[in-house]
Amino acid sequence: MTAAVDSIISVKDVRVHFKIGIRGETVKAVDGVSFEIAEGDTLGIIGESGSGKSTLARVLVALLAPTAGTILQDGRNPYELPPDERRRQHRKFQIIFQDPHAALNPRAKVLDSVREPLEISGVGASKQERNVMAIAMLRRVGINSELALRYPHELSGGQKQRINIARALILQPKLLVADEATAALDVSIQADILNLYMDLKEEFNLTFVCITHDLAVAMHVSRAIAVMYLGVIVEYAPVAVLHGHSAHPYTRALLSAEPVALPKRLQTGQRIVLQGEIPSPVSPPSGCRFRTRCPIVQPVCAERVPEFRKLADEHYVACHFPLERKEVMP
Amino acid sequence: MSLELQESEASGSTAAAQRMTAPLLTVKDLEVFFRHGRDWLRVVEGTSFEVARGETIGIVGESGSGKTVTGLSILGLLPPGLARTQGSIRLDGREINGLPESEMRSIRGRKISMIFQEPMTALDPVFTVGEQIGETLRTHTGCSIREGRDRAIEALTQVGIPLPERRINEYPHQLSGGMRQRVMIAIALACEPDLLIADEPTTALDVTIQAQILELLLKLVQARGTSLIFISHNLGVVAQCCERMVTMYAGQVVETGTIDDVLEHPLHPYTSGLLRSMPSLAKPGTRLASIGGRVPPPDDMPEGCHFQPRCTHAVDRCREPQALLRNASGRDVRCIRHNELALPGVVA
């Protein structure tokens, strides 16, 4: 959605379908998503369970090949590169997962886990040199060198997530995807990790993609947000625009449903409680996917798929009846 | 159970009037110990709070603060032999801490109910939804199987489950997370308890489903005048649901007050730190105020104030044991410096 010349990620009509069951049903986890991320930008991708955000995360770092459509990393399609070239490209696109414990080898010491990527990529002349690099990176993410010889089970959740960050950054990637990377942490620890992300982003000149169900986290760290619902992006806008100017009824409902810790006198704004639940991605509704829960649904919504269109500069929405700025939903 | 009912009927209107003003639940100096090898570790320490009839209070704290253990000890659900409790838990003036299991059974589900975070593990996978609601009703009211079934359908209707006649024959795995939590609410409220303890009831749910469940829960407890203890790490949810909140840290109550008072003028440095670390209230892209450090483990509690090693306001006196102090406006706080400090809340 920014000029194609300097975009580090370019996703075009990407679909990821999984075959399940014996009857050959297909889960359409991601079903036609297009966007671009400019180098150095921070994009938040928000959505609820089943929206396809984690599947999309894996597509961005080429862990999962799209069923249809193309993904360009740095202008190159990873699936058209020769194998060793592709591996080299892999290093520049890293991901951090939700469960910091599951992401670490329980039998490997912290230092070994952080050094491993260097070994695999043949960076550094000797084991000693790689150890020095690993310890420097651990120190940068706030892990004391005395913890380097511990095992993951001896560390807290926040410390483990710092180690995962060190592991992801040690090959000096260009892009870092954080998939619910603070969801398992307590609020005060989450604040430390979010601060670390923001510092490292500056320091390593990273492009950062924050995938989360937590709107407050996404809004805090991102410059722009893509809102996903049932495999598609329904709205894309800079954070400043999304605050109060969101045009898609789903975005409005999502933002209003998030409970905010404010005194009652400051709890303003309409709270929209959506009825029903997110439909199955095996057989999504015809036309607009959100129509079964939409408070302002019209007959046309069942017939035609709304086009993902430009409302304003950098503001895109997929809705037949986008909301005006001050418009109140029934 | 029946004995107690007769008693309360006989005691007349003055007692009834008194009951309206006296708190429903009074927890005083509650201490919970867990067995740790040969020792006992104190995981909840000197916890005191009250819940009035029809009141909704939130217990807020991070992992390891003791909020769930406090909830379980009120219901007498901690494993005997591995845990022991001290102090007083009075329900309607009657001491329930240390009651024999047979008597606790008549209180659980009938007078106090609980909803847990993960409805899939709280429901029995091998019984249908209808059987599980019916069981609660039959145990506590002695109704027939048929009557239990009818009332189960009614209970499911009240929690907004479509086609309840069909749903009562389904097993938990056939329902979505939101529907399962509705079933849990139906079971918990089936016998119209006086007190409902909800332990992170929406943490496993999506935001839009969470909004539905909170709306439903509040509507039902308000309509029945049920008191609610809402245990959560999410301050936003507590601000939306509760009138008062209790902040716990490292096994202790550190602060109580009405939601608005605590959010605007926290008295304890930990509460203030917790509020300031929330990304929703910070300016986008700025550094979040961080508390630093982490919650001490129960076998390595710092001396005096448990928060003192992480506190920027700590002085020498903080290394002495701290009592829960009542301030001029009736709020409890476990900080000797609460009168000198003007701590920032959510409104800068």
Image: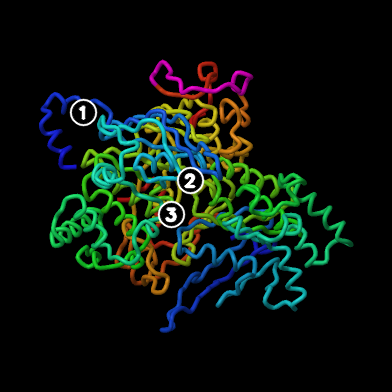
Q: Which mark, residue B204?
A: 3
Q: Does residue A262 appear anywhere in the picture?
A: yes
Q: CA distance from mark 1 to mark 2?
A: 48 Å
Amino acid carrying mark 3 in the image: Ala
User: Residue pushed farthest front?
Assistant: B38
Residue A97: image location, x then y, percent: 60, 59
Q: Does residue A260 appear anywhere in the picture?
A: no
Q: CA distance from mark 3 to mark 1?
A: 36 Å
In the rendered image, the vertical position of residue B192 relative to residue A318, given as above or below: above
**Number of numbered tags placed on the structure image:** 3
Residue receiving disc 2: A243
Residue A323 belongs to magenta span:
no
Residue A273: image location, x then y, percent: 33, 51
Q: Nearer the viewer, mark 3 or mark 1?
A: 1
Nearer the N terminus, badge 3 or badge 1? 1
Amino acid carrying mark 2 in the image: His
Side (left or right) of A81 relative to A330: right
Q: Which residues are magenta?
A: B314-330
| Colouring method of the image | rainbow
Label 2 chain ID = A
Q: CA distance from mark 3 to mark 2?
A: 26 Å
Q: Which mark, residue B19?
A: 1
Residue B324 belongs to magenta span:
yes
In the rendered image, the vertical position of residue A58 relative to residue A134, given as above or below: below
What's the magenta bit mostly, secondary-structure-wise? Answer: loop
In the rendered image, the vertical position of residue B29 relative to residue B149, given as above or below: above
